[in-house]
Amino acid sequence: MAEETRKYTLEIWRQKNANDKGGFKTYPIDDVSPDMSFLEMIDLLNDRLARTGEEPVTFDHDCREGICGACSMYINGHPHGPHQGVTTCQLHMRSFPNNAKIVVEPWRAQAFPVVKDLMVDRAAFDRIIQAGGYVSVNTGSARDANETPISKEIADEAFNAAACIGCGACVAACKNASAMLFVAAKVSQLAILPQGQAERKARAEKMVAQMDAEGFGACTNTGACSAECPKEIGQEHIARLNREFLGASLSSKNVGDFKLIKQ
Amino acid sequence: MNWFTRVLTSSIGRKVLMALTGLFLSLFLVVHLIGNLQLLAGDEGAAFNAYAAFMTTTPIVKVASYLLYATFLLHIVQSILLTMHNRSARPVGYRSAGSSQGVSSTSRNMGILGTIILVFLIIHLRNFWYEMHWGEITTDAAGNKDLYKVVSEAFAQWWYVALYIVSMVGVGFHLWHGFASSFQTLGLNHAKYTPFIKSLGYGFAILIPLGFALIPIIMFVQSGN
């Protein structure tokens, strides 16, 4: 039996480069299998565009199994589409009724400039990590696993924060384009583990300073970030970031400005 | 930059100022409501006028009132600065912005709700606060300025009562998000206390504005208009 296929009307943001004004372009697409992922559907479109001599749609993608955070599409008003807890590569066309209109936009934020079409530059996140989202470890032979006892409860909580894949959906979903959930996850995962204690205060202060310098907005506790996060990272981590930042600001010996990481 | 300025002008520092000033203003609402309830004492305003005189002449209350004005200004100025900063964080908007699951409309519209409250505040201060301080007010039997008369004349007009009700709905929605949100901003999010804070916030957001709105309604009914 022939597989049932679907038709869609895609409205996709096309922008040649960072300086181009850009605009939406409509692409009707047919013969779409409901079992295709959203990215495979765009692959199909691009294959057809290439055959007709039109420039294919540029988009970020990598692992296609929901763990890398590369695929960044704002689909019908939601980062990664209408479902909760998934990335765009995990979104399937069966989620869209036949003949539906699908609007696809890039992440929109001052700190995430559009490179081309649906691809944005998320290096701002890398610079925030560079500012303090790490632990310093001596090189040499690897230490034994479970050498430092950590309770299951703490390990689970740290792991929930560490599930962040740095996709930027939190920024894309936030009405203020705030990066608080991302920074909160990165600060949280280290702040509650023994390995993260040495750099704990400086980490919170430096990462927040870098986040502000990158031009992200401020948090207004709407909770849209957690609702749209593919890893469903919760608001309690933002509260912890607030705590860590305030505690560090009041008690650390950093009286001057922080050296920011330049673009 | 001095570390103190750096912290207070950071995105989290600004939010902390919003939270602290917001909580202080919430506390003020409780005090204000308790004072207002004396309008319903049924003594032709004797208690209320004595209270108004106490509130405008006692030195310690005067100091507190300057702190209150400063808090209002800080909350308003900070909100304008934050809104401008947040707008600039997304210069190009979305064509199809959907609403995310579990996100309250009050949390998305704090600026609009705040603006409603600000407009109300200006009218409210002009009609009562300004009149009490610098207006021509007759005195009551005890020799206190008869603010009760000013209030009861205002609340005898239906449109004035309507303005108060609409404004109190605005205050209610503003508190609906603002109360619990302040605690989150201050870093207080805990499995044991957050559910209590949220419930307290919702109760506060309903009961306090309801109390404020009932006073003009009752006085309007009593005026017989």
Image (spheres, grey):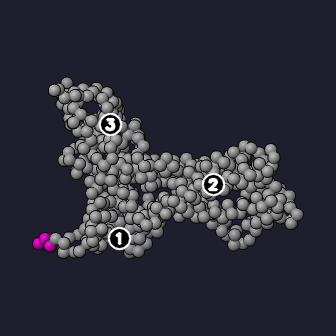
> Do discs 1 and 3 belong to a common subunit?
yes
Residue A43, picture quadrant:
top left
- Left or right, B178 with respect to B167, comes to left
Near mark 1 (Cα within 10 A), the count class, few <14, some 14-19 or many ≥20, is many
Q: On the rendered image, what quadrant is the C terminus of chain B found in?
A: top right
Q: On the rendered image, what quadrant is the N terminus of chain B found in?
A: bottom left
Question: In x, y percent, where is residue A225?
Answer: 38, 51
Q: Mark 2 falls within which chain?
A: B
Task: Kindly report the distance in space between the C-alpha atoms of the residues bearing marks 1 and 2.
Answer: 41 Å
Task: Kindly report the distance in space between the C-alpha atoms of the residues bearing marks 1 and 3.
Answer: 40 Å
Q: Are marks 1 and 3 in contact (CB under 8 Å)?
A: no
Q: Would residue A56 be visible to someone looking at this image?
A: no
Q: Give the residue pinned by disc 3.
A: A104
- Left or right, A54 with respect to B142, comes to left
Q: Mark 1 falls within which chain?
A: A
Q: Give the residue pinned by disc 2.
A: B209
Q: Give the residue pinned by disc 1.
A: A201
Figure disc tally = 3
Q: Would residue A103 be visible to someone looking at this image?
A: yes
Q: Is residue A250 magenta?
A: no
The residue furthest top is A52
- Left or right, A163 with respect to B167, comes to left
Near mark 3 (Cα within 10 A), the count class, few <14, some 14-19 or many ≥20, is many
Say what amino acid the circle numbered 2 marks: Pro
Seen at 44% across and 59% down, the residue is B11
Question: In x, y percent, where is residue B154?
Answer: 77, 49
The residue stretch that appears in magenta = A139-144
Say what amino acid the circle numbered 1 marks: Lys
